[in-house]
Image (cartoon, rainbow, N blue to C red):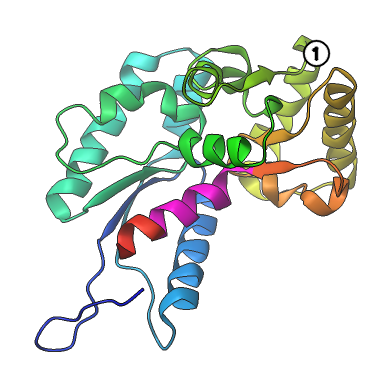
Amino acid sequence: MQHESNPVGRMRMKTIGVLGGMSNQATAEYYRLINELVNARLGGWNIAEMLISSVNFANIERFVRTDDWDQAGLYLASKALGLERAGAELLLCVSNTMHRVADVFTAGLSIPFLHIADPTGEAIRAAGLSRIALLGTKPVMSAGYLRDRYTRRFEVEILVPNQAEQEVVDRIIFDELVRRVLLPESRAAYLDVIDRLRERGAQGVILGCTEIFLLISQADRSDFPMFNTTVLHVRRAVEMALQ
Protein backbone atom coordinates (compact mmCIF):
# COMPACT_ATOMS: atom_id res chain seq x y z
CA MET A 1 0.00 0.00 0.00
CA GLN A 2 1.34 3.43 -0.94
CA HIS A 3 0.92 6.28 1.52
CA GLU A 4 0.87 9.87 0.41
CA SER A 5 2.81 12.53 2.27
CA ASN A 6 1.85 16.15 2.48
CA PRO A 7 4.05 18.80 0.77
CA VAL A 8 6.48 18.97 3.70
CA GLY A 9 6.91 15.22 3.76
CA ARG A 10 4.75 14.25 6.75
CA MET A 11 3.34 10.74 6.60
CA ARG A 12 -0.46 10.98 6.76
CA MET A 13 -2.37 8.57 8.96
CA LYS A 14 -5.52 8.84 11.03
CA THR A 15 -5.08 9.71 14.68
CA ILE A 16 -6.30 6.80 16.81
CA GLY A 17 -8.21 7.76 19.94
CA VAL A 18 -7.96 5.19 22.72
CA LEU A 19 -10.29 4.98 25.69
CA GLY A 20 -7.85 3.39 28.12
CA GLY A 21 -7.19 2.70 31.76
CA MET A 22 -9.34 -0.45 31.70
CA SER A 23 -6.84 -1.59 32.79
CA ASN A 24 -3.49 0.18 32.55
CA GLN A 25 -2.00 -3.19 31.58
CA ALA A 26 -4.32 -3.54 28.60
CA THR A 27 -3.76 0.09 27.64
CA ALA A 28 0.00 -0.37 27.68
CA GLU A 29 -0.36 -3.42 25.43
CA TYR A 30 -2.55 -1.49 22.99
CA TYR A 31 0.04 1.30 22.84
CA ARG A 32 2.86 -1.18 22.28
CA LEU A 33 1.06 -3.32 19.73
CA ILE A 34 -0.34 -0.43 17.69
CA ASN A 35 3.06 1.21 17.42
CA GLU A 36 4.83 -2.05 16.58
CA LEU A 37 2.33 -2.84 13.84
CA VAL A 38 2.49 0.64 12.31
CA ASN A 39 6.28 0.40 12.27
CA ALA A 40 6.14 -3.07 10.72
CA ARG A 41 3.88 -1.70 7.99
CA LEU A 42 5.71 1.57 7.29
CA GLY A 43 9.25 0.93 8.48
CA GLY A 44 11.83 3.50 9.43
CA TRP A 45 10.96 5.57 12.48
CA ASN A 46 7.19 5.45 11.90
CA ILE A 47 4.86 4.86 14.83
CA ALA A 48 1.18 5.64 15.27
CA GLU A 49 -0.43 9.02 15.79
CA MET A 50 -2.46 8.32 18.88
CA LEU A 51 -4.35 9.99 21.71
CA ILE A 52 -5.06 8.10 24.93
CA SER A 53 -7.60 9.07 27.56
CA SER A 54 -6.73 6.83 30.49
CA VAL A 55 -9.50 6.66 33.06
CA ASN A 56 -9.22 5.74 36.72
CA PHE A 57 -9.74 1.98 36.86
CA ALA A 58 -11.10 2.25 40.41
CA ASN A 59 -14.13 4.02 38.95
CA ILE A 60 -14.59 1.30 36.34
CA GLU A 61 -14.27 -1.47 38.92
CA ARG A 62 -16.91 0.22 41.09
CA PHE A 63 -19.32 0.66 38.18
CA VAL A 64 -18.97 -3.02 37.27
CA ARG A 65 -19.31 -4.33 40.84
CA THR A 66 -22.38 -2.20 41.54
CA ASP A 67 -24.01 -2.62 38.10
CA ASP A 68 -23.99 1.15 37.71
CA TRP A 69 -23.91 1.10 33.93
CA ASP A 70 -25.65 4.46 33.60
CA GLN A 71 -22.79 6.22 35.35
CA ALA A 72 -20.26 4.12 33.44
CA GLY A 73 -21.71 5.29 30.15
CA LEU A 74 -21.70 8.95 31.18
CA TYR A 75 -18.16 8.72 32.52
CA LEU A 76 -16.79 7.24 29.28
CA ALA A 77 -18.91 9.53 27.11
CA SER A 78 -17.10 12.58 28.44
CA LYS A 79 -13.74 10.93 27.74
CA ALA A 80 -14.73 9.88 24.22
CA LEU A 81 -15.93 13.37 23.39
CA GLY A 82 -12.68 14.75 24.73
CA LEU A 83 -10.71 12.49 22.41
CA GLU A 84 -12.72 13.64 19.39
CA ARG A 85 -12.27 17.29 20.33
CA ALA A 86 -8.53 16.71 20.77
CA GLY A 87 -8.27 15.43 17.20
CA ALA A 88 -8.94 11.69 17.27
CA GLU A 89 -10.25 10.40 13.94
CA LEU A 90 -10.99 6.84 15.04
CA LEU A 91 -12.11 5.59 18.46
CA LEU A 92 -11.20 2.38 20.30
CA CYS A 93 -12.18 1.18 23.76
CA VAL A 94 -9.65 -1.23 25.25
CA SER A 95 -12.20 -3.07 27.42
CA ASN A 96 -14.58 -5.80 26.27
CA THR A 97 -16.56 -5.24 29.47
CA MET A 98 -17.18 -1.54 28.89
CA HIS A 99 -18.55 -2.18 25.41
CA ARG A 100 -21.75 -2.77 27.32
CA VAL A 101 -22.17 1.02 27.25
CA ALA A 102 -20.68 1.61 23.80
CA ASP A 103 -23.97 2.98 22.48
CA VAL A 104 -23.86 5.62 25.22
CA PHE A 105 -20.25 6.76 24.93
CA THR A 106 -20.37 6.88 21.12
CA ALA A 107 -23.68 8.76 20.88
CA GLY A 108 -23.19 12.07 19.14
CA LEU A 109 -19.63 11.40 17.98
CA SER A 110 -18.80 12.05 14.35
CA ILE A 111 -15.72 9.81 14.22
CA PRO A 112 -15.95 6.05 13.53
CA PHE A 113 -15.90 3.60 16.44
CA LEU A 114 -14.31 0.19 15.98
CA HIS A 115 -16.25 -2.30 18.09
CA ILE A 116 -13.99 -4.87 19.70
CA ALA A 117 -16.19 -7.84 18.78
CA ASP A 118 -16.25 -7.22 15.04
CA PRO A 119 -12.67 -8.12 14.03
CA THR A 120 -12.93 -11.23 16.21
CA GLY A 121 -16.26 -12.22 14.72
CA GLU A 122 -14.84 -11.86 11.23
CA ALA A 123 -11.82 -13.97 12.17
CA ILE A 124 -14.06 -16.73 13.55
CA ARG A 125 -16.17 -16.70 10.41
CA ALA A 126 -13.07 -16.76 8.20
CA ALA A 127 -11.91 -19.84 10.11
CA GLY A 128 -15.19 -21.57 9.30
CA LEU A 129 -16.17 -22.06 12.94
CA SER A 130 -19.64 -21.66 14.38
CA ARG A 131 -19.55 -22.69 18.07
CA ILE A 132 -17.09 -20.75 20.19
CA ALA A 133 -16.41 -20.39 23.90
CA LEU A 134 -16.13 -16.94 25.49
CA LEU A 135 -13.96 -16.00 28.47
CA GLY A 136 -14.03 -12.58 30.10
CA THR A 137 -15.30 -10.74 33.12
CA LYS A 138 -18.62 -11.79 34.60
CA PRO A 139 -20.59 -9.14 32.65
CA VAL A 140 -19.02 -10.34 29.40
CA MET A 141 -19.84 -13.98 30.10
CA SER A 142 -23.23 -13.60 31.77
CA ALA A 143 -24.83 -10.71 29.87
CA GLY A 144 -25.85 -10.77 26.23
CA TYR A 145 -24.32 -7.62 24.79
CA LEU A 146 -21.28 -9.35 23.29
CA ARG A 147 -22.70 -12.86 22.95
CA ASP A 148 -25.67 -11.52 21.00
CA ARG A 149 -23.46 -9.45 18.70
CA TYR A 150 -21.40 -12.49 17.77
CA THR A 151 -24.56 -14.49 17.09
CA ARG A 152 -26.48 -11.78 15.27
CA ARG A 153 -23.70 -10.43 13.09
CA PHE A 154 -21.52 -13.48 12.56
CA GLU A 155 -23.82 -16.47 13.16
CA VAL A 156 -21.58 -17.77 15.93
CA GLU A 157 -23.06 -19.74 18.82
CA ILE A 158 -21.40 -18.70 22.07
CA LEU A 159 -20.71 -21.03 24.99
CA VAL A 160 -19.75 -19.65 28.39
CA PRO A 161 -18.40 -21.28 31.56
CA ASN A 162 -20.77 -22.34 34.31
CA GLN A 163 -21.40 -20.05 37.25
CA ALA A 164 -18.59 -21.39 39.43
CA GLU A 165 -16.12 -21.22 36.56
CA GLN A 166 -17.19 -17.66 35.78
CA GLU A 167 -16.36 -16.68 39.35
CA VAL A 168 -12.85 -18.09 38.96
CA VAL A 169 -12.23 -16.44 35.59
CA ASP A 170 -13.52 -13.08 36.82
CA ARG A 171 -11.55 -13.17 40.08
CA ILE A 172 -8.29 -13.84 38.27
CA ILE A 173 -8.89 -10.90 35.94
CA PHE A 174 -9.67 -8.38 38.67
CA ASP A 175 -7.28 -9.61 41.36
CA GLU A 176 -4.34 -10.61 39.19
CA LEU A 177 -4.28 -9.79 35.49
CA VAL A 178 -5.11 -6.09 35.79
CA ARG A 179 -2.05 -5.88 38.09
CA ARG A 180 0.00 -8.05 35.70
CA VAL A 181 0.22 -10.83 38.26
CA LEU A 182 0.66 -13.97 36.15
CA LEU A 183 0.51 -17.14 38.22
CA PRO A 184 1.02 -20.71 36.93
CA GLU A 185 -1.94 -21.96 38.95
CA SER A 186 -4.19 -19.33 37.35
CA ARG A 187 -2.99 -20.34 33.91
CA ALA A 188 -3.83 -23.94 34.76
CA ALA A 189 -7.27 -22.91 36.02
CA TYR A 190 -8.03 -21.06 32.78
CA LEU A 191 -6.89 -23.98 30.67
CA ASP A 192 -9.06 -26.35 32.71
CA VAL A 193 -12.08 -24.14 32.01
CA ILE A 194 -11.22 -24.08 28.31
CA ASP A 195 -10.86 -27.87 28.23
CA ARG A 196 -14.31 -28.30 29.77
CA LEU A 197 -15.82 -25.89 27.26
CA ARG A 198 -14.17 -27.90 24.51
CA GLU A 199 -15.79 -31.05 25.89
CA ARG A 200 -19.14 -29.23 25.61
CA GLY A 201 -18.58 -28.73 21.90
CA ALA A 202 -16.67 -25.45 21.60
CA GLN A 203 -14.52 -25.29 18.46
CA GLY A 204 -12.36 -22.46 19.79
CA VAL A 205 -12.30 -19.76 22.44
CA ILE A 206 -12.52 -15.98 22.44
CA LEU A 207 -10.10 -14.34 24.86
CA GLY A 208 -12.77 -11.76 25.63
CA CYS A 209 -10.84 -9.69 28.11
CA THR A 210 -7.95 -7.58 26.93
CA GLU A 211 -5.61 -8.91 29.64
CA ILE A 212 -6.23 -12.66 29.21
CA PHE A 213 -3.62 -13.02 26.48
CA LEU A 214 -0.99 -12.04 29.05
CA LEU A 215 -1.74 -15.30 30.87
CA ILE A 216 -2.56 -17.84 28.16
CA SER A 217 -1.76 -18.08 24.47
CA GLN A 218 -2.28 -20.29 21.45
CA ALA A 219 0.87 -22.21 22.42
CA ASP A 220 -0.95 -23.52 25.50
CA ARG A 221 -3.49 -25.36 23.33
CA SER A 222 -1.98 -25.46 19.87
CA ASP A 223 -4.83 -27.51 18.37
CA PHE A 224 -7.65 -25.34 19.75
CA PRO A 225 -8.11 -21.92 18.10
CA MET A 226 -7.81 -18.94 20.42
CA PHE A 227 -9.16 -15.60 19.22
CA ASN A 228 -7.27 -12.79 20.93
CA THR A 229 -9.59 -9.77 20.94
CA THR A 230 -6.73 -7.41 21.78
CA VAL A 231 -4.53 -8.33 18.83
CA LEU A 232 -7.41 -8.57 16.37
CA HIS A 233 -8.75 -5.18 17.49
CA VAL A 234 -5.32 -3.59 17.08
CA ARG A 235 -4.76 -5.04 13.63
CA ARG A 236 -8.03 -3.69 12.32
CA ALA A 237 -7.46 -0.29 13.95
CA VAL A 238 -4.08 0.04 12.23
CA GLU A 239 -5.62 -0.93 8.89
CA MET A 240 -8.23 1.80 9.32
CA ALA A 241 -5.65 4.35 10.43
CA LEU A 242 -3.45 3.72 7.40
CA GLN A 243 -6.20 3.62 4.78
Is 3 displayed left or right of 32 in the figure? left
Q: Which residues are magenta?
A: 228-238
The kind of secondary structure the magenta stretch mainly shows is helix
Q: Residue at x 53, y 38 (%)?
A: 122
Looking at the image, is 186 positioned above or below residue 184?
above
Figure quadrant of the C terminus: bottom left
Near mark 1 (Cα within 10 A), the count class, few <14, some 14-19 or many ≥20, is few
Residue holding disc 1? 164
Figure quadrant of the N terminus: bottom left
Mark 1 is on which residue type? Ala
- Whether the magenta-drawn stretch holds residue 41 is answered as no
Q: Quadrant of residue 201?
A: top right
Q: Quadrant of residue 52?
A: bottom left
Residue nearer the viewer, 54 or 5? 5
Q: Secondary structure at mark 1?
A: helix
- The percent coordinates of residue 152 (x first, y second) are 48, 17
- The percent coordinates of residue 25 (x first, y second) are 56, 51
Looking at the image, is 6 positioned above or below residue 117?
below
